[in-house]
Image (spheres, rainbow, N blue to C red):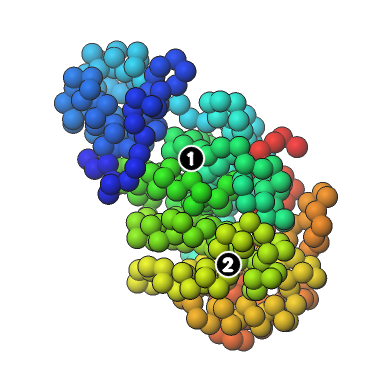
Amino acid sequence: MSGGPGLPGANPALACSRDGKVNLLNLSAGELESFVESLGQPSFRARQLWKWIWAKGERDFSRMSDLALSLRVVLQDRAEVVRPETLCRQIAADGTVKFLLRLSDGETVESVLIPSESRMGKERFTLCLSCQVGCAMGCTFCSTGGMGFKRNMDMGEILGQVLEAEDYLAGIPGSPPLRNLVFMGMGEPLLNLVEVLRSLEVLNSESGLCFSPRRITVSTCGIEKGLKELGEAGLCYLAVSLHAPTQALREKIMPAAASAFPLERMIAALRAYPLRARERLTFEYLLLGGVNDSSAEARELAKIMSGLKGKLNLILYNPAPGSPYSAPDEEAARNFAGFLQSKNITATMRKSKGLDIKAACGQLRSSLA
């Protein structure tokens, strides 16, 4: 039972709730083993406990039947398994489900369960995860950015979203299991790198949540610190929110990201990003009407993509109340995509889902409104 390749993590003594109990969702495998041994128990008990928490999603120690009764009694007094609480679920006409979740300190975040059809014609779901309460990046098209930044989420809060979504799907007869995850909800993952990496370790663990790295995507708007570390960990695929093919335009619509990691330097870093066989970078490009959707921007974007092993997801902007932007003209969007495809660039127009419940790209704000 490994605790991961030297990742910094939570100290069990510091992972206690207000009543002094340790939330086991915040402990890595190695940390859980240390905690169990501190209770005078053999290490194999930690492996049993880990399986109950992650593989079986159990929160009640009394139902963990293969644990010694004496250990279950001690755990009731010293530990807990606390997930975010689902306050509300909204279901869109297209089947998208938005979860409003309350964290232990009363803060709220949103996650989104998105239905789609696989290449084999079977239904599948992708969960869009949040990793921060709010966001510090302030991208001008993003509702989350308008909230400002409140705090980072810990591993238990991040992974609790997965457990809540799995429970929801388990309650619907015939639903497929959750297999795909994207860190594209509220927050910038690379600004919460320690907890995101700890979460990815549990997600990848065969005795944990058992997700394939090929089915996990972490999206960044462009943060230099931690980019190489994320790639070398090999625990996920990378997506980059590009949205502008020039530094000048990026500074207008993504000022914090453009200032912190200028476009030319970011593209150079992405060329050096470690990729496995058959892996490609994904670039997200939000088409803003009359802003970044002209033939001139398409030509500049083609120049960038020609030197990268990547693919483009083109997204039609979803107008929000008070936003300075509008949706692109449909013909302009088709021409934009067609030009890129004519240059042998993989460019797909991604259909937004959950628009009627404000669950689409850039619409999350952690509220019931």
Answer whether residue 320 is visible to the viewer in this image: yes
For badge 2, the amino acid type reads Pro
Name which quarter of the figure residue 41 lies in: top left
The residue depicted at 82 percent of the width and 57 percent of the height is 324
Q: Which residue is farthest front?
A: 259
Q: Is residue 287 left or right of residue 57?
A: right
For badge 1, the amino acid type reads Ile
x and y percentages locating residue 143 in the rendered image: 71, 48
- How many marks do you count on the picture? 2
Q: Is residue 63 above or below residue 33?
A: above
x and y percentages locating residue 298 in the rendered image: 67, 79
Q: Is residue 270 above or below residue 129?
A: below
x and y percentages locating residue 19 in the rendered image: 44, 15
Give the mark toward the camera: 2 or 1. 2
Q: Secondary structure at mark 1?
A: helix
Q: Which residue is denoted by mark 2 in the rendering?
A: 262
**Which quadrant is home to the N terminus?**
top left
For the residues labelled 2 and 1, the Cα–Cα distance comes to: 29 Å
x and y percentages locating residue 188 in the rendered image: 55, 50
Q: Which residue is denoted by mark 1 in the rendering?
A: 158
The residue depicted at 36 percent of the width and 20 percent of the height is 79
Specify the label residue 149 is tagged with. Answer: none
Q: Is residue 154 left or right of residue 74?
A: right
Neighbours of disc 2 within 10 Å: few (<14), some (14-19), many (20+): some
Q: Is residue 264 left or right of residue 144?
A: left
